Image: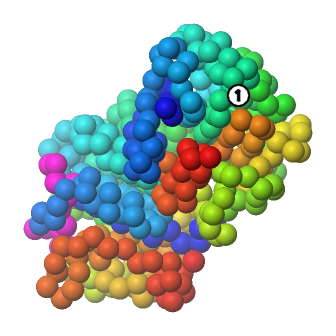
Amino acid sequence: MLTIIDYGTGNLGSLANMVKSIQIPVKISSDIAEIESAEKLILPGVGSFDHGMQKLEELQLIEILNKKVIRDHIPILGICLGMQLFSLTSEEGKRAGLGWLDAKTVKFSFQQNSSLKIPHMGWEELNIKKSHFLFQDTKLNAMYYFVHSFHLVCNKEEDILSTSHYGYDFVSSISKDNIIGVQFHPEKSHKYGMKVLENFCTN
Amino acid sequence: MIQTRVIPSLLLKGEGLVKTVNFSNPKYIGDPINAVRIFNEKEVHELVFLDITASIERRSPRFDILSNIASECFMPLGYGGGIRTLEQAKKIFSLGVEKIIINSYAIENPSFIRNLADMVGSQSVVVSIDAKKNFFGKYETYTLSGTTKTVWNPISWAQEAERLGAGEIILNSIDRDGTMKGYDIPLIKNVSGSVNIPVVACGGAGTAKDFSTAVHEGGASAIAAGSMFVYYGKYRAVLINFPDDEELKSVGLN
């Protein structure tokens, strides 16, 4: 069963409903035993990096997540903050991330006279860097919805699945074996986002 | 970036969806969740929900309804109506709403715009301005669903809202609301020419061509409409609809 990890960071309603609308059975859970039995995981997330890590820790989910993802190689999709938590550190906080990805999370940084605002909020295209099932059969001009102040910087080029442009090119999705992450919100990107979720759920 | 967002602006009264004409005579047009589900099927860039009686009744937003709407909404969502505290705004965000829309209370207490922007960032703070032409042809700003005239003209109020940290203006024409006779282009032009933040034109759209006029002649950054997306045909049958990409392209948008 696909399990969306509920660690107390925002409304998971639209995500769960979108998954349901593509006819995939889904569970929302913070229960260790349920996560243990999951075949696929989604780590969503809105809010700050430290708050997210603290919540995972409080719910004692870090160990089980490490087991599922690193040892059992269960596919996991991180969304927004969820993906950023895969990194080693974040400029947003002091806590260590899950460290599954050789990457750090940094704040958007523009020249002082830039009119670009933070958070970055809007629809952007993806510049897909490698072939991956996540974007299989997606439209060429597909747009995805972003709301974020921080983004990943990957130390390994091969982990970058796509970049998008906001002031400069930033990492908008990653993949490393069973670990996949998207900076945008598929659950807020109507048809295009639904296709990405469907690809994750069915591959 | 999407060049021009096209945004259905949907009005809540109680638990139902209504549509007004000149901000009056709200007519029941259906269930909000059903409307959201239909819009999910279209490639809608953003949805706006406005509770048109919350401020008049001086009551809180209906968090229960909003939570259901946000859970069904597969696109970014803005909400306005009855927001008077930062706690309410925070709660609305936690329900999965991306933008907070304020109108009456912003005029009553302009520093709320600043406080909200400090808390959530300007991007998520939208000031909605309801404008109406007076007998002498001058525009005036109204609050409380068009029932109360204020001292502000829409241009100076938009500038003040921008100065205080609003990230976007939704500019409604009370005169054009529900008429489907086209946007009030001079109003849009005056306001969009006076601020640097995006101005979303609202009120009067009847055809996709009207969008293009609001953008190319009025200088609107984005387009909102109500009647056009909920009515169909000359007898105004209730039918949720939305122009596809091709249609938008054919009028010179996106």
Left or right for A22, reference A120: left
Q: Is residue B24 magenta?
A: yes
Q: Residue sitting at 16 percent across and 78 percent down?
A: B237
Residue furthest to the right in view is A156
Q: In which quarter of the view is residue B37 placed?
A: bottom left
Query: Which percent across, then down, holds residue B100?
Result: 41, 47
Query: Which percent across, then down, holds residue B217?
Result: 50, 86
Relative to A54, does residue B192 appear above or below in the rendering?
Answer: below
Please give the count of numbered marks on the rendered protein. 1
Q: In which quarter of the view is residue A72 placed?
A: top right
Query: Circle 1 is placed at which residue position?
Result: A73
Look at the image and tell me in which quarter the N terminus of chain B lies.
bottom right
Left or right for B234, reference A97: left
Query: Which percent across, then down, holds residue B92?
Result: 38, 38
Magenta-colored span: B12-26
Q: Is residue B55 magenta?
A: no
A177 or B35: nearer the viewer: A177
